[in-house]
Image (cartoon, rainbow, N blue to C red):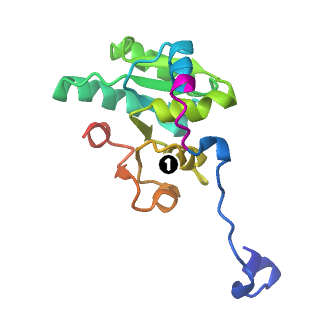
């Protein structure tokens, strides 16, 4: 856009990617991790999805994948969700109820920023099924926190994670479960 609209030579343009704060660089403070686990009553293992419940964040397809994971593989991996209730929140809650995922799904809502690095660090993996992202900062936050990433192959997401994540088709619950 800068080249097209303003005639700036491409070699004079340099993209500066986003980064995460030092608080996400993996801390080895086990006491702090246990305090956050206790504060939110978290299981020892869980998938983590930090995202407001906008429809494009694809929460309901993730729930279908969790249901398939349980039905097909007898795996009841708990999933912890953070973020503010938005336009897809009712559909998300209804899908959790319909798919009988109440014991598997933890909805924490908005959490304190200082707890986020520990929520990543305590997670078995970040699951990120978003259909669209301009960037996807949670992907970097997870990687900086040494949390494995399993994510959508849509929009900018593959560019952000490179070869450091497992990718899936975010429209296919079976692909997510696999």
For the image, the number of numbered tags is: 1
* Residue 156, position as x, y percentages in the image: 53, 58
Q: Residue 140: in sight, yes or no?
A: yes
Q: Residue 51: in sight, yes or no?
A: no
Q: Quadrant of the C terminus?
A: top left
In the image, 155 versus 117, the foreground residue is 117
Dot 1 falls on a residue whose secondary structure is: helix
Q: Quadrant of the N terminus?
A: bottom right
Residue ID at (42%, 18%): 105
Which range is magenta? 26-32
Residue ID at (41%, 54%): 153
Q: Is residue 83 above or below residue 11?
A: above
Residue lying at the far right of the rendered structure: 6
Q: Is residue 113 above or below residue 40?
A: below
18 displayed left or right of 122: right
Residue ID at (54%, 15%): 40
| Residue 31 painted magenta | yes
6 displayed left or right of 153: right
Q: Name which quarter of the figure residue 99 lies in.
A: top left
| Residue 54 painted magenta | no
Q: What residue would you read off at disc 1?
A: 143
Residue ID at (49%, 35%): 121
* Neighbourhood count class around disc 1 (C-alpha, 10 Å): few under 14, some 14–19, many 20 upward: many
* Residue 93, position as x, y percentages in the image: 48, 17
* Residue 27, position as x, y percentages in the image: 56, 38
In the image, 60 versus 151, the foreground residue is 151
* Residue 107, position as x, y percentages in the image: 52, 18
């Amino acid at each position: 856009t800068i080249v097209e609209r303003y005639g700036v030579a491409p070699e004079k343009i340099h993209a500066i990617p986003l980064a995460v704060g030092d608080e996400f660089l993996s801390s080895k403070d086990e006491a702090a991790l246990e305090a956050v686990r206790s504060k939110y009553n978290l299981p020892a293992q869980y998938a983590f999805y930090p995202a407001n419940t906008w429809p494009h964040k694809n929460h309901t397809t993730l729930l279908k994948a969790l249901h398939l994971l349980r039905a097909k593989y007898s795996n009841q991996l708990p999933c912890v969700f953070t973020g503010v209730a938005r336009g897809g929140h009712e559909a998300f809650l209804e899908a959790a109820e319909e798919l009988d995922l109440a014991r598997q799904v933890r909805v924490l809502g908005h959490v304190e920023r200082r707890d986020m690095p520990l929520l990543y660090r305590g997670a078995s993996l970040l699951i990120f099924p978003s259909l669209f992202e301009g960037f996807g900062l949670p992907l970097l936050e997870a990687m900086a926190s040494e949390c494995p990433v399993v994510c959508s192959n849509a929009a900018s997401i593959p560019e952000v994670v490179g070869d450091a994540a497992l990718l899936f088709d975010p429209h296919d619950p079976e692909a997510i479960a696999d």
